[in-house]
Amino acid sequence: FPSSVKGSAPMSLVNDDFYIRRLYNRIQDCFGRPISSAPDAWFDVVVRYSNDNNKTLKRTDKVKRCLNLGSYNYLGFAAADEYCTPRAIESLQRFSASTCSPCVDGGTTTLHSELEECVAKFVGKPAALVTGMGYATNSAIIPVLIGKGGLIISDSLNHCSIINGARGSGATVCVFQHNTPSELEKVLREQIAGGQPRTHRPWKKIIVLVEGIYSMEGELCKLPEIVAICKKYKAYIYLDEAHSIGAVGKTGRGVCELLDVDTADVDVMMGTFTKSFGSCGGYIAGSKELIQYLKYACPAHLYGTSISPPAAQQIVCAIKVLLGEDGSNRGAQKLARIRENSNFFRSELQKMGFEVLGDNDSPVMPIMLYNPSKIPAFSRQCLKQNVAVVVVGFPATPLLLARARICISASHSREDLIRALKVISNVGDLVGIKYFPAEQKEH
Ligand code: PMP
């Protein structure tokens, strides 16, 4: 695609109220509303059909059983699990659904302490703190780590929660070109020396913010190179592993394990439990001193209620399964399965002629649609054939870089994936989004 159209939407389109309203309605139309309690490989979706002839908008809803290619349930823990679910129910009975207290008051049960120890051990850091929400972990913790007089250097495609945290911190924020270490180094060099010989660094502190797997790109962070640059320029590194923890690495320990980076070289490790662990909440892991400081300096942690006990139990159990401490090898099987499924699905899509973003081993694989008018067509045609995908367009992406984002799970069977590939291939032909010659192969 010509690089001139990358970036923000042409203003004439953005300002065209009628165009935006219509596009918005079209995009709204194509989202299903999942009503299943368990986002497993198959789930129920309420599909909205609308007829907006002239000005009358008529909508009818129908429930469809669909193959789920959209949820972040990477390891399948969000469906009823033989080890996690009975224990989560037990903890609901024992501790109730909420502690009704912040951690520093009555909100730290034995389960909460066990969870923090478990997370620290799993991610490979001396200590961890757990919060009730992943989004708020970034937006509330980053402003406690850095403030006025500090410099944040943020990847240009970082998640909204990181951007909010950076903006709310009061630090100066610079952005470097997505996942490009040489551009990060350029910004650091410019900001530290500014081309002038200096006797001191002009910043109290510098933090570089990156993600393990970028959620709209499916790309792995170039962590080894970024860590080396941060060391060279004495900048701290903050790594958001929302999509990578549990999902990649031989034992599920995320991008450090996958890319052979020593966790001691990553100062702040952040992640969420809403993806691979099938629960909710977020964590920050780091040195004992850092975690102790954050526990008392972060207002959201001091004054916000601690994570719900059944959610905490679900995470502890999921980690135990991954570590094989449940007495089975289901964890290792899930990890092998997600890797095989992801690599199989990605390579088959590429063979069919789709442009697929991201790297091997990543369970996130965006198929490029480019033109936003293809969003509803792609989604509807997939739903018609009982496959639910998440389609993403402006403002989550630049207007002309619309995509369908497939998320692969360990709970998908090979038959599920082959079925999905057939449907996506048909829809790709219909919508006209196969940009490369397909390899001849029968599915
Ligand atoms: N960080 C990243 C990179 C994310 O993609 C998300 C949400 N998908 C979050 C943080 C927020 O996590 P949660 O949904 O658990 O609040």
Image (cartoon, rainbow, N blue to C red):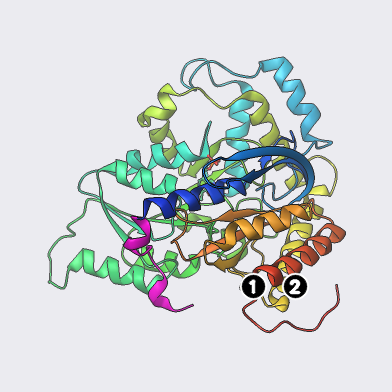
In the image, residue 31 lies at what x, y percent? 62, 46
Res 235 → quadrant? bottom left
Residue at image mark 1: 432
The residues tagged by marks 1 and 2 sit, at their Cα atoms, a distance apart of 17 Å
Q: Residue at x 12, y 71 (%)?
A: 197
Residue name at image x 29 percent, y 72 percent: 186
Q: Is residue 420 visible?
A: yes
Span shown in magenta: 1-15
In the image, what residue type sits under mark 1?
Gly
Residue occupying image coordinates x 80% and y 54%: 412
Q: Which residue is mark 2?
A: 348
- The percent coordinates of residue 96 (x first, y second) are 66, 16
Amino acid type assigned to the residue bearing label 2 in the image:
Glu
The reply to whether residue 251 is in sight is no
Image quadrant of residue 80?
A: top right
**Residue 140 rendering spot, x and y as whole percentages:** 39, 36
